[in-house]
Image (tube, rainbow, N blue to C red):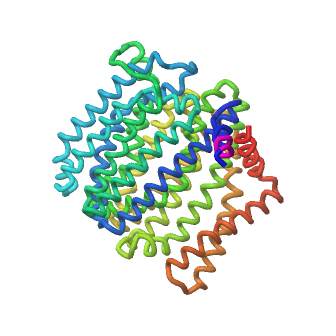
Amino acid sequence: MKDRIRELLERLVPTGSVLQRSVKSGVWVSATKMSLRLSQVLMLIVLARLLSPRDFGLMGVALLTLAATRRFTNIGLNAALVQQKEENVDEYLNTTWCLEIGRGLLVFAVVFLAAPYVGTFFGEPRATPLIRVLGLSPVFYGLRNPGVVYFQKDLSFHRDFVYQSSGAVMQFAVGVGYALYSPTVWALVFASVSRPATKFLLSYVLHDYRPWPSFDLEMARELIQYGKWITGSSIIGYVYSQGDDAFVGWFLSATALGFYQYAYRIADMPAREFSSVISKVTFPAYSQLQDDIDELRGALVQSTRLTAFVAFPMAFGIALVAPSFVPAVLGSEWTPMITTMQLLALYGLLHAITRNFGALWKAQGRPDLIAKLGTLRVCCLAVLIWPLTARFGIEGTALTVVGVYVFPMLPIDVYLAARMVEGRSAMLYREYVYPFVAATIMFGSLYYARGVLEVSPLVELLVLVPSGAVVYFVVAALLERRFDWGIERNLRMITDGVRG
């Protein structure tokens, strides 16, 4: 038995061609993401029973502050190193380490000093000490071993699995353990800080590179020159991904923010995390294929097909089961977020099926597109978010986020991604049609069945989830047989890549 397990693990070590390494890396990234999100979801479910929506809102205010300072100081060093054509980037690592340490200390100082003003701005002075303790997170991040960049650059995601999942396990243990001892918002704070602290220690165990405090100005300029657009896109990304959270917390209340953020996490997480697996693997893979436009086009189409195949049923399924999931799993206290969760499930879908475009743009040396498109999206959100939130509350905020993504962002994203590989928008839209049809049939049939059944929310949830999976895969198989969709070839490619 042990020999079989060892043989399987050896077979999954990313080796071989770019395709085989990408597929095997995808397995490890998937395992990493699943372990991370499973531990987070379990922690959130447990804590939802122990803490109040206002506690989550207070934590949300603190995390918004930390995220803002980190995003505004993100200079894209890891992306710059991964994009480098040279396999060995050791000469850059000491400079990278010094820059990251400086950034971490700067973020801590800004967060510590700004904490009382942020608490006053949101009308929540209780958030001040939470914000200051959370400021330790970027310090731990800056001190980590810069050699961990090789986990992604070399597609060595089997090491990244240990690195990432260990931090998630510690976060879960600290968060749940402290909440059982003292059910207060500090359980969320200590859980958040424990994760980067654990990863800081593990980074020196898992990689043998040892940084030394030395700084090369020319190398720093080279890295920052590439990373400047990552900085811009990071800032814009914060505004459009968390600006709505900040607006809800300021315009409505911390309790409303707790509902909104929790609905967002649950609705967006499954599809987003799967798409992030694709994005994380395709960025280094796209970078290695950047000079072969035909191979690059094929890789984009296949990654889009696979992402859509998984994202559509996840998003439609979340929208379907939300009325059962919330009271059965989280408790009746969280029912005000059901409609918001259903709307944000659609956002999660749109976010997922376009996420790997950013990896393509970065790999092709055009990270500026992420910042420019983000700016357009922020402008659209700014026009609509106030009136819709004032009229409909957090449901109006969710409607704004979804509406702006449907138009104009989705058509523009698809057009630019297709043009970059010398293709047409239709080649990507085609990959959305089949999973949309299958997911729509799944949703419609089970929505009707739910109206006929008269059972408790828990039983309804237990019936809907497996039934939805069966209906979707049956319809998908029929579409594959009738129209030669191509998803079967994708799945076989993954299987063959794992087998080597």
Magenta stretch in the rendered image:
3-7
Q: x%, y% of residue 385?
A: 37, 56
Do we see residue 275 in this rendering? yes
Q: Locate residue 416, reporting x and y percent.
A: 60, 38
Judge by depth and name the residue closer to the eye, 1 or 237.
Answer: 1
- Residue at the image position 41 percent from the left and 47 percent from the top: 240
As drawn, the residue found furthest toward the right would be 482
Q: Is residue 371 left or right of residue 245?
A: right
Residue 1 magenta-highlighted: no
The residue at the point 66 percent across, 28 percent down is 289
The image quadrant where one finds the C terminus is: top right
Front position in the image: 141 or 415: 141
Quadrant of res 202:
top left
Specify whether residue 5 is painted magenta: yes
Q: Is residue 462 above or below residue 113?
A: below
| Number of marks in the rendered image | 0
Image x and y of residue 57, in percent: 29, 59
Image location (x, y in percent) of residue 432 = 67, 53
**Residue 230 figure quarter:** top left
Front residue of 71 and 137:
137
Q: Is residue 234 above or below residue 191?
A: above
Predominant SS along the magenta part: helix
Q: Is residue 255 visible?
A: no
Q: Is residue 199 left or right of residue 273?
A: left
Residue plotted at (68% across, 45% down): 4
Residue 183 in which image quadrant? bottom left
